[in-house]
Image (cartoon, coloured by chain):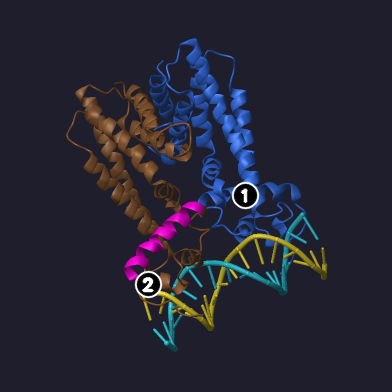
Chain colours: A blue, B brown, C yellow, D cyan
DNA sequence: GTCTATATGCTGATAGAC
DNA sequence: GTCTATCAGCATATAGAC
């Protein structure tokens, strides 16, 4: 068969990541072969190894990219405001950001166990940093007396689980719009933190 | 090598399920081989196929067992009581039942996508039946005027996501006891539903 | 009921041609 | 930068001996 012509390193690199993200989200890391990824990119298996040293690092890069982008976007969205408004902004940010990146969110929760120890530790630290952003808001509101929560750590984890849960049932063609969902969640969260 | 002596069908059957549950939870369905399961049971690969027609059905049986037992236990725990007490009981039941069965809960969330279409549909129906039990409680409280929730369906999903989230961070040797966690969650949920 | 041996095919990764 | 060809090993599942 004729060899593919030309060089596309700047295109192929991102395409490899994109294909891996899509396939890992659909079938799971362990169930996806390098051959499948190559087929999706329309390239031969050997070529993949120009863009990743191995399958494990391909997964790690995807999760690291997701987490660092998530953190950067969150920090950008947060302004110096009263805790109630910051919490509102966090709620809005978390729902929309996660609904827009269903695949990356999904593998970031599902494929953690397929990371080796070192990579797992790195991703866990990023995740904890994200959670801390929320806990800081809750603690501020608590000490200002505008929130009433029993345990800021448990409340943080409960809120994140609740908010992230939206990604498991939201359907683009469902009865509920994103704005409506966000508004209903905000009402629930307001009550939960005692505003 | 010498052949293993004797017949143990009544022991080996459950052992196969137990080993599969443990290994699937730890490494994921796709990453676990029939050879690994056989090794764990201390039996040869061929023997496994006396107890399951294939790997897919082994997974399905585990999820189906978990969901039917969960539903049966929930229904047994629920008594005719005022909605607030029923909700309290649901909260308590969900947290404790899930913490006691971390492996089964984990694969029931993680391995759904490895079920074939028919099997997926069956498990989804059981999951929906479980969710409905909670929604009925919320609707009853809503029409009696003791709860104030905007949308019983969204609230149901939010509460279940929040409660199930405990399984991802609870540690037996952590700073929080099960009873304490359950109590903190109940305080949050009471406020969330407007009690 | 459990064993051993085997079929058929896919796996991650690399070497070397172009 | 991409290709083809290949290695060594493991996958699921079955057949047939005991």
In this rendering, the answer to whether A41 lies above or below B81 is below
Instruction: Tell me the magenta residue range.
Output: B9-26
Residue B88 horizontal/vertical position (percent):
28, 30
Residue B124 part of the magenta segment: no
Question: Residue B93 at x, y = what percent?
Answer: 31, 38
Q: Residue at x 40, y 17 (%)?
A: A194
Q: Nearer the viewer, residue B193 or A45?
A: B193
Name the image quarter holding the N terminus of chain A. bottom right
Question: From mark 2 to mark 1, how far is it between C-alphas?
Answer: 35 Å
The quadrant in which residue B57 appears is: bottom left
Q: Residue at x 46, y 49 (%)?
A: B110
The residue that disc 1 covers is: A116
Q: Quadrant of the C terminus of chain A?
A: top left
Q: Residue under circle 2?
A: B50
Left or right: residue A189 compared with residue A75: left
Q: Is residue B40 above or below residue A64?
A: below
The dominant secondary structure in magenta is helix
Give residue A194's mark: none
Residue depicted at x 39% and y 57%: B117
Q: Is residue D2 left or right of residue B55?
A: right
């Amino acid at each position: 068969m004729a060899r593919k012509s030309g060089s596309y390193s700047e295109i192929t690199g991102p395409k490899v990541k994109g294909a891996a993200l899509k396939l890992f989200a659909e079938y799971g890391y362990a169930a996806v072969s390098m051959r499948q990824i190559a087929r999706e990119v329309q390239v031969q298996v050997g070529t993949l190894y120009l863009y990743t040293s191995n399958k494990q690092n391909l997964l790690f890069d995807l999760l690291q990219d997701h987490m660092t982008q998530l953190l950067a976007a969150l920090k950008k969205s947060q302004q110096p405001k009263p805790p109630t408004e910051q919490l509102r902004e966090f709620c809005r940010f978390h729902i929309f950001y996660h609904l827009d990146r269903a695949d990356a969110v999904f593998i970031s929760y599902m494929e953690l166990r397929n990371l080796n120890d070192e990579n797992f530790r790195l991703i866990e630290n990023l995740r904890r940093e994200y959670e801390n952003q929320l806990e800081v808001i809750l603690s501020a509101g608590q000490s200002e007396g505008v929130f009433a929560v029993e345990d800021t750590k448990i409340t943080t984890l409960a809120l994140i689980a609740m908010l992230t849960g939206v990604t498991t049932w939201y359907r683009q063609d469902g009865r509920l719009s994103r704005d409506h969902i966000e508004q209903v969640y905000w009402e629930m969260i307001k009550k939960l933190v005692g505003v």
